[in-house]
Amino acid sequence: MRRSRTVRLTAILALGASAAVTLATAASAKVIVRETTHEEDTFVLNNFCDVQGLTVEDAFVGDFRLRAVPHGRGRLAYFLEHGKVTQVFTNPATDKSVTAVSRFIEKDLRVTDNGDGTLTILVLSTGNGVVYGADGKAIARNPGQVRFEILVDHNGTPADPSDDEFLADLGEVKGSTGRTDDFCAAVVPALT
């Protein structure tokens, strides 16, 4: 009788300890970065699409939601971003314009601490980009997803992304899975 009570008490304590560990893990998985931004700007692009002498004005509006949560043993930050970007490209010489609208999600699939002060991050970028002519009809599309890697200096704090510094784009790991129209081939004739 005493033994079954001890076993039961041990089981209850073990369940309690397990629950405490689970709650502590859940609490430590809190969001460490959460930002919502709105950006607007206008740029002048010379020799647009490598066309000598073609100057285009790019009026840019972007809305972004970004968050990061720690994952894994090292509690490294994994980012997730949702965005919508609208760009109006105008040729001031002809007053012709096109509008490009992109909606995307970018998320870190894998963050690797390289042990040398850097992180290699595998990023999935997926979404839909459409370019509309002056009449409102689509003239180019780019739906699908790509995967690429970047290299980041973590400045001695691999679990704290606030002081990270971008070092290099390591290139595509997986090319576009969707239709990929040539942006310049569609846009240059519409602007000239």
Image (spheres, grey):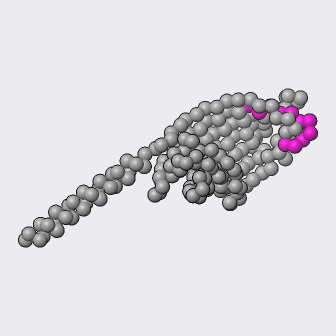
In the figure, is residue 132 to the left or right of 62?
A: right
Considering depth in this image, is 191 or 137 the residue closer to the camera?
A: 191
Whether the magenta-drawn stretch holds residue 56 is answered as yes
Task: Please provide percent x and percent y for residue 36.
Answer: 55, 35
Considering depth in this image, is 112 or 62 the residue closer to the camera?
A: 112
Quarter-of-image position of residue 97? top right
Considering depth in this image, is 153 or 112 the residue closer to the camera?
A: 153
Task: Please provide percent x and percent y for residue 74.
Answer: 48, 55
Considering depth in this image, is 15 or 74 the residue closer to the camera?
A: 74
Task: Please provide percent x and percent y for residue 18.
Answer: 29, 59
Query: Which corner quadrant holds the C terminus?
Result: top right
Q: How many marks?
A: 0
Quarter-of-image position of residue 136? top right
- Residue in the picture at 72% in, 50% down: 142
Query: Which corner quadrant holds the N terminus?
Result: bottom left
Question: Would residue 126 be visible to someone looking at this image?
Answer: no
- Residue in the picture at 59% in, 58% down: 114
Q: Give the residues drawn in magenta, as a range.
A: 49-59
113, above or below 99, in the image:
below
Whether the magenta-drawn stretch holds residue 114 is answered as no
In the figure, is residue 55 to the left or right of 35?
A: right
